[in-house]
Amino acid sequence: MSEAAAKKGFGEKPQPKEERRKFQAIKGTRDLLPPETALWHRVEQIAQEVFASYGFGEIRLPIFETTDLFARSIGLETDVVSKEMYSFEDRDETSISLRPEATASVSRAYLENGMQQLPQPVKLYTIGPMFRRERPQKGRYRQFYQIDAEVLGGSDAPAIDAELIEMVMKFFERLGLEGVQLDINCIGDKKCRPIYVERLRAELRKVKDRLGPDSQRRIETNPLRVLDSKLENEQKLIEGMPHIAEHLCEECAENYRGVKKELELRGVKYRENWRLVRGLDYYSRATFEITAKGLGSQNAVCGGGRYDGLMELLGGPPTRATGFAIGEDRLILSLQEAGKAPAPQGRDVYIAWMGEKAYATAIRAAENLRAAGLRIELPPAEQKFGKALGQADKLRARYALILGDNEVASGQWTLKTLATGEQIKLAESHLVDFLKGEKAKADPSHRSG
RNA sequence: GUGGGAGUAGCUCAGCUGGUAGAGCGUCGGACUGUGGCUCCGAAUGUCGUGGGUUCAAAUCCCAUCUCCCACCCCA
C-alpha cells in the first residue's frame, strides 16, 4: 500500500502532523536488512547443503505449540518455561506458547507423524525463529534464530553422536568460522546422574559459605550449574569438586569412551570439559558446546547432546535421540566480526535508455537478460545520460547497456564496462551470450569479500 | 528480574557553566538534454527518545518512563 493510501485508510482523524506516531520493533526484536540478509541466506544455504550431504531432511514446524509440550520436555522448573516463554490463552482457553527452542517440537512431530515407521534413525533439521523473554544483550534477542538438527530413533551408537558433531564442525569449517572450540562432556543418564548430583550437592554444601549467593542458591536448585560459575573466586573450590566422569555407570562410561574414539577416527578435535553441563532437563550422556570468537560473554554458538528420555516424557515409546541447536544470530555475528560478510549485491547491468523508441527496446532487453539469470536495473523513467551512468555506479553495476536512438536504428547496442570505461558494440542476439560468458569467467559470487 | 552506560537529521557525531539546533557522510535536484566516479552550488528531513517538573527561558538541570548497548541471572 502506498503511503497516501495508508493515510486515507486510517483517516478517521485527519490531523496528519500532530497525531503522527512512531512505531518501533518490540524490545529484543530487530529487522534484518540487506546486505546482511545475503549473509543469512548464505549461512542457511550452506547448512542445507552440508546437512543434506549427511542425509538430513528439512522439517518445517509451527512456531507455537501448547504450553504443556514445553513444560513437559524442557522442565517446569527451568527459567525458560517458568519465566521466559511468551504464553497466551487461545480462545478455547488452551495455553499456547511461542516456541523457546525446537527440540520439543521436532520430537512431537516425530511421534505425531509416526516416523517410527521410517528407516531409523530419522535425521531432520529445521531453521527458524525462537522466542524467549530475556533481557537482550550481545548475541541475545527475544526473537532469535536457530539452526537445529536432530537424529531420532535408532541406536545409541557413539558413531551417531560423533557424526552429528562432525557435521556441525564441517558446517562451521565451510563457513570459515574463526576461533572454533568444541567442548564435550558426558552428563550420565537417569540412573547415574542423580547419584552424582547428590554427591556434588553434598560436597558443595560443605563449602557453601565460601560461595556467592547465586551459587548458594544453585546448590539446591541445580547443583550442576555451580560448575558453570564465572566468578573468579569460586574457581578453585569448583576444581576440587567431584568429577562426573568418575561417577558414570558402566553403560554411560562405555558410551562416552566410544564417542571420543569415534571423534578421533573422524579427525574432530575436541576438548573434554567436565564442567560443561546442560540447562535443560532432557539431556543425558554425551553433550557438547561449541564457542567461537567475536561474541562477547554469550559466546556459545552451538550446543547439543543426547536426550534419550524425552520421547517417553512426551508419551511416546523409549526412543534414542541426539541433536544440536546453533544460535544463528551469534553465528552471523561472529562471521561479521571476522569480516566474512559478502559484498553488497550490485547489478550486472544497468540499462541506460533514452527516448520512447529505446524504452520499448530496453524493456525487451531487460526481460531477456533477466531470463538469463542476470541482475538487471531498468530505470522507470528517462534520465539524463550522465545521471544514468551515475546511478549505475551507485548501484555497483558492472555494465551499462546504452540504448538510444543510434542503437535502436543500427541494431548495434553499446555495452560499457563501468570499471574501465571500455565500450563495445554488440548485436542484440549476441548480448546475452557475451554477458553470461563474462559472468562465468568472473564468478565472484561465492567467495566472501 | 538485577546492575552499569547511552539516546540530538537516514548514518556518525558536535553543541562550554541553561538563551530556543549544527557539521560531515548519505539522499534528492542543478552546474552537465549521448558518456559515470571528481568538483562546485542548492534542497529536504529533527516536536533534541517520551512525559512531567524547576526557570522569564531547557537539547542542557531534576524526576519518571521507554528503547538501545554491555554485564549478571538463566540459557543455546
Image: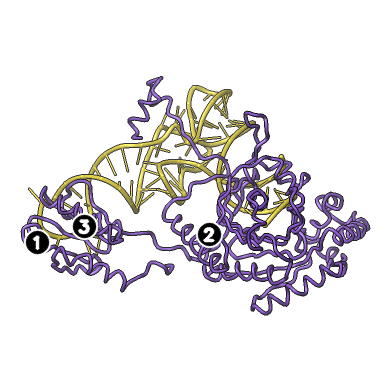
Chain colours: A purple, B yellow
Residues tagged 3 and 2 counted as in contact (Cβ below 8 A): no
- For badge 1, the amino acid type reads Gly
Q: Is residue B42 above or below residue A416?
A: above
Q: In this view, does B10 lie above or below A250?
A: above
User: Tag 3, which chain?
Assistant: A
How dense is the environment of label 3, judged by Cα within 10 Å: few (below 14), some, or many (20 and up)? many
User: Tag 2, which chain?
Assistant: A
Residues at marks 1 and 2 on the same chain: yes
- For badge 3, the amino acid type reads Leu
**Disc 3 from disc 2: Cα separation:** 34 Å
Residues at marks 1 and 3 on the same chain: yes
Residues tagged 1 and 2 counted as in contact (Cβ below 8 A): no
Q: Position of residue A136 (x, y in %)?
A: 61, 47
User: Farthest residue in the top direction?
Assistant: A13
Disc 2 is placed on an element classified as: helix
**What residue is disc 1 on?**
A411
**What residue is disc 2 on?**
A332
**What residue is disc 3 on?**
A389
Residue A66 visible to the viewer: yes
Q: Count numbered badges in the picture.
A: 3
Towards the viewer: A246 or A315? A315
- For badge 2, the amino acid type reads Ile
Q: Where is residue A25 in the image (x, y as percent from the top left)?
A: 51, 40
Observer-side mark, 3 or 2, equals 2
Towards the viewer: A19 or A274? A274
Disc 1 is placed on an element classified as: loop
Q: Is residue A158 above or below residue A214?
A: below
